[in-house]
Amino acid sequence: MASYILRRLFGLVPVLFGVTVLVFSIMHLSPGDPAKIILGPKATEASIAKLNTQLGLDQPLHTQYITWIGNVFQGDWGRSIQMKMEVLPLVAERFTATFILTLASIIIASVFGIGAGIISAYKKYSWLDRSMMFMVLIGFCLPVFWLGLLLQIVFGLNLDWLPISGMYSAGQDGFWDMIRHLILPAIALSAGAGAIIARMTRSSMVEVFSQDYIRTARSKGLKEKNVVLIHALKNAFIPVLTVIGMQIGFLLAGAVLVEMVFAWPGIGTLMVNGILARDFPLVQGVILFVATTYVAINLLIDILYAIFDPRISYK
Amino acid sequence: MEPVIQNQEIPSIKPKQKAKQGPWGMAWKVFKKDKAAVAGLILLAIMMVAMALAPFLPFADPNEVDLTNRLKPVGTEGHVLGTDHLGRDMLSRIIYGGRVSIIVGIIAVTIALVIGSALGLIAGYFRNFYDTVIMRFMDILMAFPYVLLAIAIIAALGPGLMNTMIAVSIVGIPYYARIVRGSTLSFREMEFVLAERALGAGHLHIIFHHILPNCLPPIIVAVSLDVGWMILAAAGMSFLGLGAQPPLAEWGVMLSEGQEFIRVAPHVSLLPGFAIFLVVLALNLVGDGLRDALDPKSK
C-alpha cells in the first residue's frame, strides 16, 4: 500500500508541473502585452515599462516561470492588482465560503442521490423507478444558474422563507443565519451531482442485487432492510464513493455559477471579477488553488479506494 | 431429401433480410422503439426548424427596442412571451438566441471532435512516443475540473463569444482523444487491419478506411451528449459575463440581464433558462437512445 501511495504521488509530479505551466501561461497567452491590458488604453510607455519590471515580464519566459513557481512554493502568490492585497490569503479566505457551499451540496446530493438510486434499483423497471430516473435526467439537464433563479423566485420572493443572496444578513455573523443563506445555493448546486450519484448508485445496486450472496442472505431469512442496506449497499458503495469524490472536485469549480446567482462570497465570484478586471495574478492564484485542490482530492479518492477495496491489486 | 430442401430455404431468406438493413438500419430500428428518444428527436427537430427558418417567419426584430412596452408579461397581445427590460420581444429573442447557442454548441463540438479524434487516432495507431506525449498532455488538461479549465482559457484569451467557443471546445478535446484512442488501440490489432497491412496498405488508408469508420458509433453517442453540455457551458460563461456580450440575443446573456428584474418580471430570466433546459433535455434523450442503439453492451 505504501509503495502504491508513493507511486501515485510520483505520478502526480508531471501532472502538477503541467498544471503550473498552464496556469503560468494564462498571462502570456493573452493576445497583446499583459501590462497594457492591465493598465488599460490610457497607460503611458513609462507605466507599462514599470509594471513589466514589477511583474517580471521583461525577463525570459523560463526565468519568469522559475521565479514564479519558486515564489508559489514559498507562499508568495503575487499581489492582486485590483484589490491591492496578497493573493494567497485572499484566496484562502474566500475558499472557506466555497468549501462550505460545496460540502453542503455534496451532502444533499449524496443523501438524495443514494436514496433515489437504492429505491430505483430495488423497484427496478417499476413506475417508481422510471419516474425517479426521469427526475434524475431533469436534474442532470437543468442549468444550475437557472435552477438557482427558480429557487430564489419561489422560496425567496414568493414564499419569503429564505434569504436569496449573500452569506450573512447585514450586521449578523451567526451560524444559523449562515445556514439559512446556505440552503438555496446548496440545493441549486447539488442537482447535477445528485443526478449522477443516483445513476451510479442505481446501476451499482442493480448489479449487486443479482449476485448469489444476496439470494443467500434473503433465503436465510434476513430482514429485507438488512439485506438492502447492509449486504447490498456496502458492496455497491465503492463506485458510488468514487463518483462522490469526483463530484466534490467538479462542484468546487462549478460553484462559480451558483455563487454569482446568490452573491455567495466564494472564490468563484473572486475569479470572475478578476477576469473581467484583467487581474492576472489573482486569476492565476484562484485557478492554481482550485486545480491543486482538485488533484489532491482525486489522489485521496484513489488512496481510499485502495484501502477500502482489497479485491483490487495495485501492482 | 425433403428436410435438406427445407434447411436450405430457411437460411436463404433470413440473411437477405438482414443484409438489406445493415448495421445503421438495425440501430435505427432499436432507436425508433425508444419512445423517450423519439420524443427528444421530435422536440429537437421542431426547435431546429423554428430557429433555422426564423428570418422567414413573422417574428419581431429581436433587437428592436420599445421602451413604452417594457417588461410586459407572458400572453401580452403582440408579444406572446412578453417583453424584456428594453421592450424587446421575448419570443423572438429566445428563437434568435437559440440560433447562437446551438451554433456555438455545434461548432465547439466539431472543433473538439476533429482535433480530439485526430490526436486519439495518432496516439492509438502509432503508439509509443506519440501516445505518451499526447496522452500525458490530455492528462494535464483533465487535471482541471472542466468548468475551471474553460474559465482559465477565457481568462487567457479574454472574454467574448468566440473565445468561449474555443474554450469549451478545448475542454472537450481530451474526451474525444480518449474515446478514439481506446477504439483505435483495439482495432489496430484486429485481423482485417493486419490483413490490410500485409497487403501493403498505407497508414492513412488504414486509418481513414478501416479504423475511423469503426470508431464512429462511440463518437456519435459522445457528440449527441456533448452538444448539450457545450450549449450549457457556453450559456453559463455568458451568464457570468465571460461569453457573449449584450445586446446580443443569447440565452446566457438574456438570463443574466433578466436577473435584475426577477422581482417584477421573472419571465425575462426564466424563459431563456427553460429554453436551455429543453434543448439539453432533448439532446440527452436522443443521446441516451443512440447509446442504446449503437452500443448494445452499455445497456
Image: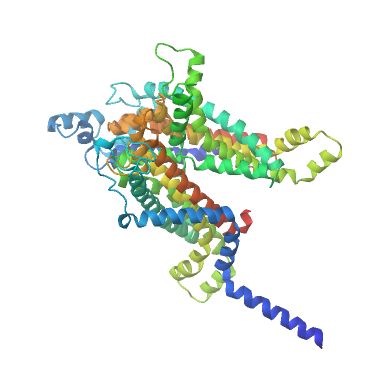
Residue B115 rendering spot, x and y as whole percentages: 40, 55
Instruction: Answer left or right for B165 relative to A144.
Output: left
Residue A46 rendering spot, x and y as whole percentages: 13, 30
Residue located farthest toward the top when viewing the structure as drawn = A171
Residue located farthest toward the bottom when viewing the structure as drawn = B1
Position of the N terminus of chain B, as image quadrant, is bottom right
- Identified at 81% across, 33% down, the residue is A223
Residue A287 rendering spot, x and y as whole percentages: 39, 33
Q: Which quarter of the picture shows residue A235? A: top right
Front-most of residues A160 and A315: A160
Instruction: Answer left or right for A204 relative to A149.
Output: right
Instruction: Answer left or right for B198 relative to B103.
Output: right
Front-most of residues A126 and B198: A126
Residue A130 visible here? yes
Residue B129 visible here? no
Front-most of residues B279 and B113: B279
Is residue A33 placed above or below A90 in the rendered structure? Answer: below
Q: How is the image coloured?
A: rainbow
Count of marks placed on residues: 0
Is residue A159 placed above or below A33 in the rendered structure? Answer: above
Residue A109 rendering spot, x and y as whole percentages: 57, 32
Q: Which quarter of the picture shows residue A269? A: top left
- Identified at 63% across, 35% down, the residue is A114
Residue located farthest toward the front when viewing the structure as drawn = B77
Q: Which quarter of the picture shows residue A90? A: top left
